[in-house]
Image (cartoon, grey):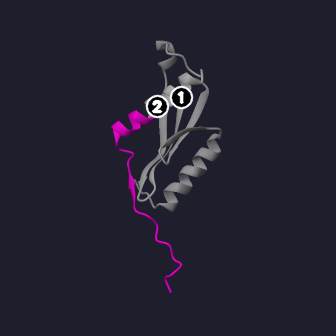
Amino acid sequence: MGLFKKKKPSVKNLLSDRQLKENLLDTALSVLVNQQELSLTKEDFTGIEAEFGYLLMIADHGLEALFKIKKDSAVYYFAAQQGKLMLLSINEAQFQSTVAYMLDYHKVTD
């Protein structure tokens, strides 16, 4: 009886989409500037690193992403979901466990 078995939606891994990652990072940096975590000086943008945990397009759901921006000792975590970008209040362990869960749940291999 398959009445109650819900099929998982198809998922496309977009980690190789450089333009999409740049757009998300630009928006995230704008959020940090607006919240006065960064200013618009050249020095503030020097040494910024970014790491994407996942970047998925999920059928019937849309874009799902989790990534972090590192500047000196500060780390800022962001999620993109349902057309919104959110600055999160999580730690590295939560970031790693969420990434592991999402990649496993959606069977993302690359």
Residue nearest the observer in this picture, 104 or 87: 87
Residue nearest the observer in this picture, 108 or 78: 78
Q: Is residue 66 depicted above or below 70 in this figure? A: below
Residue 98 % position (x, y) = 58, 51
Q: Would you call the spot at circle 2 few (<14 residues within 10 Å), some (14-19), or many (20 or more)? A: few
| Amino acid type shown at disc 2 | Thr
> Which numbered circle lies on residue 27?
2
| Amino acid type shown at disc 1 | Val
- Residues under labels 2 and 1: Cα distance? 6 Å
100 inside magenta stretch = no
The residue indicated by pointer 1 is 31
For the residues bearing labels 2 and 1, Cβ distance under 8 angstroms: yes
Q: Residue at x 50, y 87 (%)?
A: 1
Question: Which image quarter: residue 35?
Answer: top right
Q: Residue at x 65, y 38 (%)?
A: 89
Residue 73 % position (x, y) = 61, 25
- Left or right of 70 on screen, residue 25: left
Residue 52 % position (x, y) = 47, 41
Please provide the residue range marked out in magenta.
1-24
| Total marks placed | 2
Q: Is residue 58 depicted above or below 32 in this figure? A: below
Q: Residue at x 62, y 41 (%)?
A: 92
19 inside magenta stretch = yes
* Secondary-structure class at tag 1: helix
> Which numbered circle lies on residue 2?
none
* Secondary-structure class at tag 2: helix
Residue nearest the observer in this picture, 58 or 106: 58
